[in-house]
Image (spheres, grey):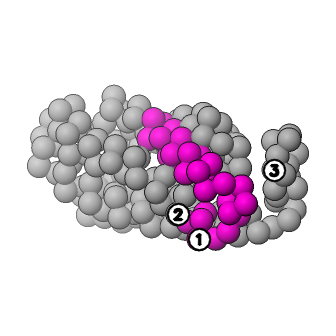
Amino acid sequence: MGAVGNVLGVLAILVGRIPTPGVAQLALDFSSLAVVIVAIFAGWRLGALTGLIAGIGPMILFGYVYGSTGLVTVLLPVGKALTGLFVGVVAGIIGSNRKLRSTWVFAAIWVGYIPESILTWFYFVNLVPLFVPGASFWAPALAIPVEVKAWIEMTIIAFLTVALIRNAAFRSFLGRLVPGQSF
């Protein structure tokens, strides 16, 4: 699923560039879809590991290909790991009897994304100005469209996750990937 996350992230980044004046790095990134699915169905440990792996492709594209903040973008996989960790924890607290209900899936994803959102804000407001000359002017302003885009992505990911978990064939597929779990 980490590889699936990388493919979803890289393809979305390459195809889903968001035209923003003066900003080359604003693009869609759906790598968290794989992270969220693993976190909900297999728990926080595998969710966090999947996040670390799924964040590698977006880290390379955002940091080294499209931007000049490569040194600090190593936090991208850490952020995705935080999402996997917290979505998995929230899904575990919700419990398996409510885990497949739409409202609980949305709640787990939105609440679970908050730590990565905080890290993203901290990254743009505090770290980018330290490592990129002249960024103290534009980096904090870039945090706002990045955060808005990310919350829209997580909402879309929540809708896609709900659609997938309602599909019996998908739940059967997950049952083969995670033995001992009934979906």
Up-down: is 145 above or below 82? below
Residue 29 image offset from top left, x and y in percent: 50, 54
**Residue 111 position within the rendered picture, expressed as x and y whole percent measured from the top left:** 46, 57
Query: In the image, 78: left or right of 137?
Result: right
Say the numbered circle drawn on residue 103.
1
Frontmost residue, 98 versus 152 = 98
- Give coordinates of residue 93: x percent, y percent: 59, 51
User: What label does residue 150 carry, if any?
Assistant: none
Say what secondary structure mark 1 lies in.
helix
Within-10-Å neighbours for mark 3: few <14, some 14–19, many 20+: some
Evaluate whether residue 10 shows in this view.
no
Quadrant where the C terminus lies? Answer: bottom right
- The residue depicted at 20 percent of the width and 39 percent of the height is 126
- Give the mark nearest the N terminus, 3 or 2: 2
Tag 1: residue type?
A: Thr
Q: Are marks 3 and 2 in contact (CB under 8 Å)?
A: no
Quarter of the figure with residue 133: top left
Q: Which mark is residue 107?
A: 2
Closer-to-camera residue (149/82): 82
Q: Is residue 131 above or below residue 7?
A: above
- What SS does tag 2 mark? helix
Check if mark 1's residue and mark 3's residue have beta carbons within 8 Å: no
- Secondary structure found at label 3: helix
Label 1 to label 3: alpha-carbon separation:
21 Å
The residue segment tinted magenta is: 77-106
Q: Where residue 174 is drawn, which disc sits there?
A: 3
Q: How many marks?
A: 3
Residue 22 magenta-drawn? no
Question: Is 156 positioned to the left or the right of 138 in the image?
Answer: right
The residue lying at 54 percent from left, 34 percent from top is: 52
Q: Where's residue 17, x and y in %?
A: 44, 60
* In contact (CB < 8 Å): disc 1 and disc 2: yes
